[in-house]
């Protein structure tokens, strides 16, 4: 039974729910409707978990060639394909039903758009173009916007800033993963930036995305969505992330890519908490 749970990628589900909650709280200026939040989080969790199962299934032949993924449940046939895909379909339908039940059509439409970008576009083209990473980041930028839409029911500057923040964060975050597992991805025939264009160019891209991230995120404070605490955190943690990125251009540091990956998680979680608190 544990293998059916693992193919939902619970870590990815939880990470996306953190940013979903940040968007939900950010939009809750007049008070938090915790009942609404509970059902919306559950619906979002179901849809994300469903997308992860389908992605795992589509990736199984690529995963077979990679050291870090060769023991996944679909690869080792530890689970029934039909049962797993049937369960994923039910999760998707249940998530949609919950959004309809709480009368949040806007959030439902956004959730389904993200689902189809991730499953039917990103998952199917990731071994065909290095631009798949950017497409995947679009899907990954939706959860906080969906959380925001669940409350606001319309798009405004807050939603646009959440989307931009997540795009700019995800790209250097994923490039760090690509550098960590470059040989694995190369073996699987996945054309990522460090494989196609080299490590130096990848580091340049990471640096530029982080600069843009540090430039864009203070706009939450400028437009009145957050207070000074958020701005200070952006300058502090964003500045540290930028310094780490610059250190990557020195003589190769031990596990620099892994440190960049881990610190990117610190950055997004700290800022998500402060966004939720409207600090």
Image (tube, grey):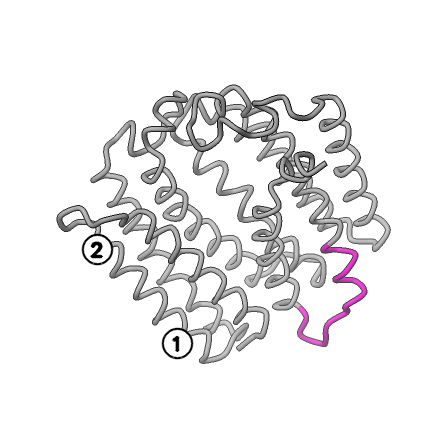
Please report the residue visible at 54 percent of the width from the left and 72 percent of the height from the top.
Answer: 225
Please report the residue visible at 40 percent of the width from the left and 45 percent of the height from the top.
Answer: 171
Q: In this view, does 93 lie above or below 265?
A: above
Which residues, given as a range, are shown in magenta? 28-41
Mark 1 or 2, closer to the camera? 2
Q: In this view, does 250 lie above or below 128?
A: below
| Left or right side of 89 for 275 | left
Q: Which mark is residue 232?
A: 1
> Nearest the camera: 26 or 172?
172
Please report the residue visible at 47 percent of the width from the left and 60 percent of the height from the top.
Answer: 268
Q: Residues within 10 Å of mark 2 (few under 14, many from 20)?
A: some
Quadrant placement of the N terminus: top right
Residue 229 on image: x %, y %: 46, 79
Residue most toward the left?
251
Q: Mark 2 points at which residue?
A: 246
| Left or right side of 52 for 131 | left
């Amino acid at each position: 039974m544990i293998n059916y749970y693992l193919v939902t990628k619970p870590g990815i589900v939880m990470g996306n729910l953190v940013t979903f909650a940040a968007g939900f709280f950010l939009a809750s200026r007049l008070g938090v409707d915790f009942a609404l939040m509970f059902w919306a989080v559950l619906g979002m969790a179901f849809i994300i978990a469903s997308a992860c199962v389908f992605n795992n299934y589509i990736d199984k032949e690529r995963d077979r060639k990679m050291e870090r993924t060769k023991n996944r449940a679909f690869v080792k046939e530890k689970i029934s394909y039909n049962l797993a895909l049937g369960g994923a379909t039910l999760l998707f339908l249940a998530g949609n039903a919950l959004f309809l039940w709480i009368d949040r059509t806007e959030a439902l439409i956004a959730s389904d758009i993200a689902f189809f970008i991730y499953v039917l576009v990103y998952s199917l083209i990731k071994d065909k173009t290095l631009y798949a990473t950017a497409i995947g980041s679009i899907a990954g930028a939706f959860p906080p916007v969906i959380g925001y839409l669940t409350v606001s029911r319309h798009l405004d500057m807050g939603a646009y800033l959440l989307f931009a923040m997540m795009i700019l964060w995800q790209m250097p975050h994923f490039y760090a993963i690509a550098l960590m597992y470059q040989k694995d991805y190369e073996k699987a025939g996945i054309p990522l930036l460090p494989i196609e264009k080299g490590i130096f160019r990848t580091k340049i891209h990471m640096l530029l995305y982080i600069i843009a991230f540090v430039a864009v995120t203070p706009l939450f404070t400028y437009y009145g969505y957050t207070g000074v605490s958020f701005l200070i955190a952006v300058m502090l943690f964003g500045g540290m992330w930028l310094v780490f990125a610059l250190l990557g251009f020195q003589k190769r540091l031990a596990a620099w890519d892994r440190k960049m990956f881990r610190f990117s998680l610190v950055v997004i979680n700290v800022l998500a908490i402060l966004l939720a608190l409207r600090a």
